[in-house]
Image (cartoon, rainbow, N blue to C red):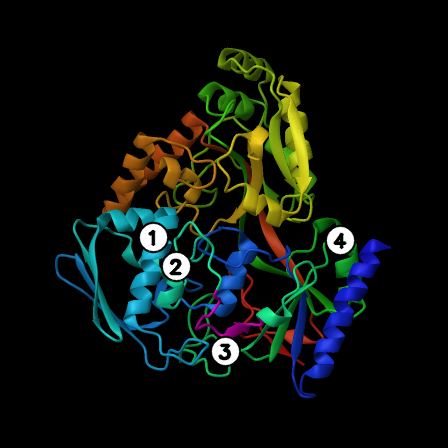
Amino acid sequence: MRRLGQLAACLALSTAAAAAAPASAQTLKMVAHSDLKVLDPIWTTAFITRNHGYMIYDTLFAQDAEARIQPQMVDKYEVSADKLTWTFTLRDGLEWHDGKPVTAEDCVASIKRWGARDALGQEMMKAVGTMDVVDAKTFKIVLKEPFGLVLDALGKPSSTVPFMMPKKVADTDPFKQIDDYTGSGPFIFKKDEWKPGEKVVYVKNTKYKPRAEPPSMLAGGKVVKIDRLEWLAISDPSTAVNALVQGEIDLIEIPVPDLFPLLKADKNVELYGWNAQGSQIIMRFNHLHPPFNNLKARQAAMYAIAQEDFLRAQVGDPEIYRVCNAPLVCGSPYEKSYGNLLIKPDLEKARQLLKESGYDGTPIVMMHATDLLSSNQLPPVGKQALEKIGFKVDLQSMDWQTVVTRRAKKDPPAQGGWNIFYTTTVTVGTESPAGNSFTSGGCEKAWFGWPCDPEMEKLRSSYAKEIDPAKRKEIAMAVSDRVMDQATYIVLGQYKAFGAYRKDRISGWLPGPVPVMWNITKK
């Protein structure tokens, strides 16, 4: 009854909002993969916040469907002969949602804030000597040493995306959340209609000037063809699917595979592999506190894992998942497998490693995001696997946004911290050691879990500086080995993400590593 009440409340809000809108307004109603509570896409890598970022912000560069980095906010750029000076000129007509022009000063401030948090951004900033504003629309990045991934960094497609923000917003401490959501992107966030746990509302930015090129994944013209977009928070998968089948909503970002038969049975509904390149599932350790500040405890956990158990529980359909123990993604140029590790458990070795680690039996805090459909079935499987070898596990249930907030805490687990959580990442960009946040060994600057591994940082910096493809591959293989040797994190396999939509109503959903909402037409 609670779930039905939730749906009724969401739809009632939508109906009331629609009644207030002009009769000709086209409203797209969708169920996103999670509720939105954190609004700063630089402060967190949560995909729901990243998706929110793509709605309201724009990027200097963007990746197209051929994996090429293309100018987006940038009109033209020049590179000096020694590859150390990069000059960027913004295109005409860029405005913030408050009507003020986008300036080079805004972009420099935004790059600095992003570069303090993102793994690839941190590598780039190590190579940056100065970033100078030339005029209102032009700025320079002057490198003090070679860095081969400048455009890859500025056009990074997924978390953390270098979104451009007004200088007054970008000047916010990178480790504190912003409270001003002024962007220059194709949609405007309606903060006055935002109701966490119920709905998020965006409206078309009528002053946005798209690029002239046809849209291609995240690049090209971002042409918005609807007037209003509503993300409805319906956490129960069955309720969401029933709402789609009954025509009460238009789209579900990620329905659960168990319900695919219901969707396939409806002639008006289309299952759509919008992220055909897939996602990777991760178990993340906290390296700051016992027991996983000890290498042997992390290794013990690795030898206890069978990926298939996790994939079967979370994804279900073997047609869309893949057992894969390559940290830098199966199917990428840097794929490297490691025998039976993470495929077939070695419980005897795992128990011996746990004993050698000195684990004292203190329960480990494993966070369980019950409402995140991409990982909510993983923690119970992980609990069972680790308990088989002698860990005691305190499985703590909460919503995903609580996990997002809590995982940023460095406090001991007994004081509100954590030991393990689970997440997924799109495989696009994950194959790059410099861009893969999970590989970072940058201590307090590393991604949540904060591994401190100077050797890893040397490898990642070398990769970012290297131009020769063969040498770069050698470094990537060494990064992959280091992840497995140090048990930096655990890869739990890969799967393809599918959405579902009313094909009798909407068309134009572009493929990509994120759910692209521009270009969609509603009948």
Q: Report how far apart the C-alphas of labels 3 and 1 lie in the structure.
A: 29 Å
CB under 8 Å between discs 1 and 2: yes
Which residue is label 3 attached to? 223
Q: Residues within 10 Å of mark 4 (few under 14, many from 20)?
A: some
CB under 8 Å between discs 4 and 1: no
Based on the picture, tell me whether residue 185 belongs to the magenta stretch.
Answer: yes
Identify the amino acid type marked 4.
Asp
Q: Report how far apart the C-alphas of labels 3 and 2 lie in the structure.
A: 21 Å
Identify the amino acid type marked 1.
Gly
Q: Report how far apart the C-alphas of labels 4 and 2 lie in the structure.
A: 32 Å
Q: Residue at x 64, y 21 (%)?
A: 392
Eye-nearest disc, 4 or 1: 1
Name the N-terminal-most of marks 3 and 1.
Answer: 1
Residue 414, relative to residue 266: is it above or below?
A: above
Magenta segment range? 180-190
Q: Magenta region, mostly helix, strand or loop? A: loop
Q: Secondary structure at mark 2?
A: loop
Q: Secondary structure at mark 1?
A: helix
Q: Residue at x 67, y 83 (%)?
A: 21
Name the N-terminal-most of marks 3 and 4.
Answer: 3
Residue 154, relative to residue 25: is it above or below?
A: above
Q: Which mark is residue 115?
A: 1
Residue 368, relative to residue 245: is it above or below?
A: above
Q: Secondary structure at mark 3?
A: loop
The quadrant in which residue 23 appears is bottom right
- Image location of residue 336, percent across then percent down: 43, 35
Which residue is label 2 attached to? 162
Which residue is label 4 attached to? 236
Identify the amino acid type marked 2.
Pro
Q: Report how far apart the C-alphas of labels 3 and 4 lie in the structure.
A: 32 Å
Which image quadrant: the N terminus? bottom right
